[in-house]
Each structure stands twice: as C-alpha cells, then as structure tokens.
Image (tube, rainbow, N blue to C red):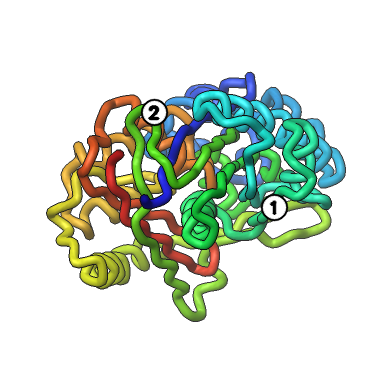
Amino acid sequence: MPATLLSLARALPEHVFTAADAEVRLSEVFRAQGEDPELVRQVVQNSGIERRYLARPPDFYLEQTSLTVRNGVYHEVAVELGVAACREALAKAGVEASEVDLIVDTSCTGIMIPALDVYVANALGLRRDVRRMPLTETGCAAGATSLAFGADHLRAYPEATVLLLSVELPSLTLQLEDATRANLVSAAIFGDGAAAGVLANRAASGPSFEHLAHETILFPETQQIMGFELRTEGFKIVLSRRIPLLVQRELRGCVDAFLAKQEVALDALKFFVLHPGGTKVLDSVRDVLELSEEQVRASRQTLADYGNLSSASVHFVTMELLERGAIKPGELGLMIAMGPGFTLEIALLRGA
C-alpha cells in the first residue's frame, strides 16, 4: 500500500493581523525608509491576503529588532506551535507518540541547535531511538520535500510511522531598515503557523490521500532568486521578480515530463495542492497548467486566510481541500511547491 496521510493538524499563534492592520503598520515602517505609502497600499491590497497570524503583537516588531531577541522568540513559539500541532495530528490519527519511528521537521525562519525535532521529541515522549530529519534551509518547498522523504522512508521500512512537522515564523525576519521591494513584499504576504501530519502504509480513518510518486528539480544557477542572507541584524529576504517568469518558462515542461513517467495525463488530475507563494505566482501556475480558477481556489483561500506560510503552506492547502471534500477516493491529484535553489517539488497523489 502506498504511503498514506493518516491525519493533518494546524497550530496558529494568537495574534491576528488583518489586511487593514498591515496597510497601516507597513505604511509607517516603509514611509520612514522613504517609500511611497501608496505603493505599500497597492502591495497589501494586491496580495490577496485578508488576515495572517503573528508570533508576537505588531508593536513587538518595531521595538525588538535584534537577532538575539527575535531568535529567542522563534525558539519559544516554534516549540509551542510544533508540539501543539503534533499532539493533535497524533490524536487524530489514533497513533501513540511511542509508535513514531521518524520525525521530519521543516523550518527556515529561525535557528535552533539542537533542532526543533529534539524539543518536540522530548515534549511528546518519542522513543529514544526515534530517527530525526530536520530540513532547515529548503524554504517554501520543504513541506512537499518532507512528505517525499517520509514516503521514501516507508518504502524502505513498510511498518514504520512517520511524523511530519512544518513550523514557520516569517514575521520574525522583518527588517525595519531594509527599503527593498523584496522586504516590502515579504512583510505583506508571509504569515506564521505550523502544521503536522502522520504518514504510514495503512488506510486512513477518513478522507485523505496516498503519495504515489515525486520528483525534485533543481534549476542551475538560480541561487539568487529566493532565500535569506543571514546578517548581523537578522534574516534579509531574497525574493526576485523573476520567479513568475521562471514558472511561466519552466513549469509546464517539468510537470508534463513528470506525469509522462507516471503515464498520467494532466487532464486526468482532479485536485491540486499548490503552494500559494503569492497571487502572481499562483496566477502563473494556473495559467501555465491551464487550470480553472476553481482548481486553484483552495490555494487562493489559504493565502487569503493565513498568508504564505512557507513550508507549512502545502499542508494548509491540503486541509482546505479535505475540509471542502475535494479529495475523493481514487481520484488523482498533483502537489507543487517551489523554494530556494531554485527548486521545484512535484508529487502525484491519489485520494484515499
């Protein structure tokens, strides 16, 4: 039996940041850097985001700017959200913590050594011999990457149980002295949150999907398109305007080649788990793959409700699809996520 997602759960910080809040706050921040408030307003309004969740109240980001303070908050909140999401995912799957054989955790918005999985393992009471795989520098693609690694592990160890965890707190990377357009866009679209799931080679108790195949594609010499530069003052976002153009140029050929290997036609796919990197990127994916607006609605809604959650986004989109009843047994679907490298993750899924 293919690797099956037994459960998914999300955890969110308590502080809600609406689009109206963002417009006011970001106008203040970027006006101080000489930016036109009208541009800020346009970026926020064109983001398609209605609200996001923040690790701390908005004033914190203006008062506490050092990497030491912000990374301390990352440590505290990442553990809190990660443990909460994992506990719920295990409970929904009917799996005891002692049954977990591998935990794959993803995060790129803070630094923890030992990694997040150590703190989660201690809090949940995972076995001493649990295997841990922290993915800390793969960005927005990492949620799909972790799912692929989990499925590969289950092919090698069919009786195993895998716990997946994605925690991202991009709000803590805001740079008040960075007047670049990339920093403005980042401040307007990214939100904080966590998602966890349980993966195993057995049937789920409710609607879910099986992971049938995956492929990772690294585009040569595209390192400067997306990522972070770690500086004295913290994480400086790297976010190129070339991303939608790269999607338009490369995505369709990559998807067609992947599906050809699986002997599946694009028009045979019934659902799409698309990482909502932003409205322009999502529009590009929709147009290049010739999808309808309905087929990208779950990604669009996830972006509106939570913003771009980096590696956790594909799990939030999956939950949106499951809650809508859009993943039906036997139907095929496609997962797509993109991240630093520049990397493309593609997975073939089947409703279970």
> Looking at this view, is 25 or 316 the one in front?
316
Q: Is residue 281 left or right of residue 172?
A: left
Q: Is residue 206 above or below residue 164?
A: above
- Which mark is in front, 1 or 2? 2
Give the crowd class for mark 2: few <14, some 14-19, many >=20 residues within 10 Å.
few
> Looking at this view, is 179 or 130 the one in front?
130
Q: Secondary structure at mark 1?
A: strand
Q: Secondary structure at mark 2?
A: loop
Q: CA distance from mark 1 to mark 2?
A: 26 Å
x, y percent for residue 193:
58, 33
> Looking at this view, is 154 or 226 the one in front?
154
x, y percent for residue 3:
42, 49
- Amino acid at pointer 1: Arg
x, y percent for residue 338:
44, 58
* Residue at the right extreme, as displayed: 68
- Amino acid at pointer 2: Ser
Residue at the image position 78 percent from the left and 59 percent from the top:
231
Marker disc for residue 205: 2
> Looking at this view, is 62 or 256 the one in front?
256
Name the residue that disc number 1 marks: 132
Residue at the image position 57 percent from the left and 55 percent from the top:
139
The answer to the question of whether label 1 and label 2 lie on touching residues, with beta carbons closer than 8 A, is no
Q: Is residue 219 above or below residue 41?
A: below
The quadrant in which the C terminus is found is: top left
